[in-house]
Amino acid sequence: MLEEFKKFALRGNVVDLAVGVIIGAAFGAIVTSAVQDLFMPIIGAITGGLDFSNYYVPLSSKVQAGLAYAEAKKQGAVLGYGQFITVALNFMIVAFVLFMVIRAMNKLQTREEQKPEAVAEVPADVRILGEIRDLLATRPRV
């Protein structure tokens, strides 16, 4: 059973998948940082400093008005539509960034595929033998 597990764990697909997951997690951290630290402040500046994450509707009379969303949640039931808007915007930005990265990768792949392969030059002796063969083929048979 241990040998079978070893074969499974060391197969190319499993190792490739593990590498993909690790790189994906690291790339996810980069994209998350780009969204939170680069794009969202710009969106906040454009919208006049609005922070969507603190928009909510209290569903309980225990919730005091004017509290931050996190504090309001501690006091009672709240409908956090602002947090949903923030997460939806983050998703749209992340999806767009991933689209642009994959698009760039696809362009690079097509460029690599379009490069003409170098045609190997036929050695002189093989070329001459081919010419002799062709001449013999055109010669009338006696």
Image: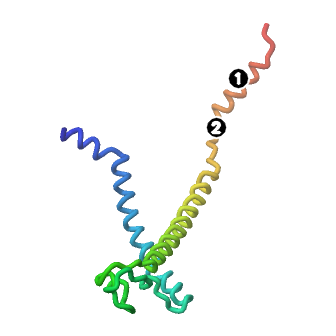
The correct choice, above or below, for 141 with respect to 76 in the image is above
The foreground one among 129 and 46 is: 46
Where residue 26 sits in the image (x, y, percent)? 38, 68
Please name the amino acid that badge 1 sits on.
Arg
The foreground one among 80 and 32 is: 80
Q: What is the CA distance from the residue labelled 2 to the residue labelled 1? A: 15 Å
Q: Residue furthest left?
A: 2
The colour scheme applied to this rendered structure is rainbow
Where residue 108 sits in the image (x, y, percent)? 58, 59
Q: Which residue is mark 2?
A: 122
Task: Looking at the image, tell me whether mark 2 or mark 1 is earlier in sequence order.
Answer: 2
| Residue at 64% across, 52% down | 114
In which quadrant is the C terminus drawn? top right
Quadrant assignment, res 139: top right
Q: Residue furthest right?
A: 140
In which quadrant is the N terminus drawn? top left
Position of 58 with respect to 114 (left or right) is left
Please name the amino acid that badge 2 sits on.
Val
The correct choice, above or below, for 19 with respect to 88 in the image is above
Within-10-Å neighbours for mark 2: few <14, some 14–19, many 20+: few
Q: Which residue is mark 1?
A: 133
